[in-house]
Image (cartoon, grey):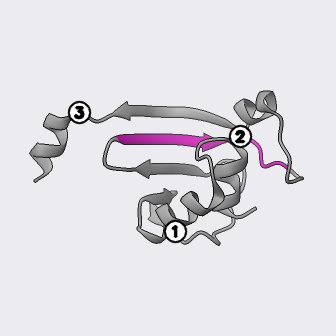
Amino acid sequence: MRIDQFLKLSRIIKRRNQAKILCDEGVVRVNGSVVKASKDVKEGDVVEIDTVNRYLKFRIDAVPAGKNVSKKMARELITIIEDKKKSISDIIDLI
């Protein structure tokens, strides 16, 4: 399954188009490498999303077979390793 589609089905990102844009901007990494939206993911992959105001790192536990996933099943697709919201002082330190 494509990473942009997985991010949408797992409800990490609301729309697939947003996931594609984040991939195109180099914000999404799979196993430490920046990926395009078309990158196929599998169980065990570690995904990092590093945006301006949030850093999220999770492991993929399951990849759904279909294109529809219930809310309950979406929570079971990943295990969150790290979820950190960035403050304004963190952003200023980067500049």
Q: Which region of the structure is painted magenta?
A: 54-64
- Residue that extends furthest to the top in the rendered view of this protein: 72
Relative to 39, residue 45 above or below: above
Q: Which mark is residue 61?
A: 2
Q: Magenta region's main secondary structure?
A: strand
Q: Which mark is residue 35?
A: 1
Q: Amino acid at mark 2?
A: Asp
Query: Considering only order in the chain, which callout, 1 or 3, is on the residue closer to the N terminus?
Result: 1
Q: CA distance from mark 2 to mark 1?
A: 19 Å
Query: Considering only order in the chain, which callout, 3 or 2, is on the residue closer to the N terminus?
Result: 2
Single out the mark in the foreground, 3 or 1.
3
Q: CA distance from mark 2 to mark 3?
A: 30 Å
Q: Is residue 87 left or right of residue 65?
A: left
Q: Amino acid at mark 1?
A: Val
Counting from the top left corner in percent of width and height, residue 16 is at: 65, 58
Contact, mark 3 vs mark 1 (Cβ under 8 Å): no
SS category of the residue bearing label 1? loop
Asked if the stretch drawn in magenta spans residue 62, the answer is yes
**What residue is rendered at 41% in x and 59% in y?**
27
Q: Amino acid at mark 3?
A: Ser
**What residue is rendered at 63% in x and 51% in y?**
7
Relative to 41, residue 37 above or below: below
Query: Considering only order in the chain, which callout, 1 or 2, is on the residue closer to the N terminus?
Result: 1
Q: Nearer the viewer, residue 75 or 46?
A: 75
In this figure, which residue is indicated by the disc labeled 3?
A: 87
Counting from the top left corner in percent of width and height, residue 37 is at: 59, 69
Asked if the stretch drawn in magenta spans residue 91, the answer is no
SS category of the residue bearing label 3? loop
Q: CA distance from mark 3 to mark 1?
A: 26 Å
Q: Is residue 14 left or right of residue 65?
A: left
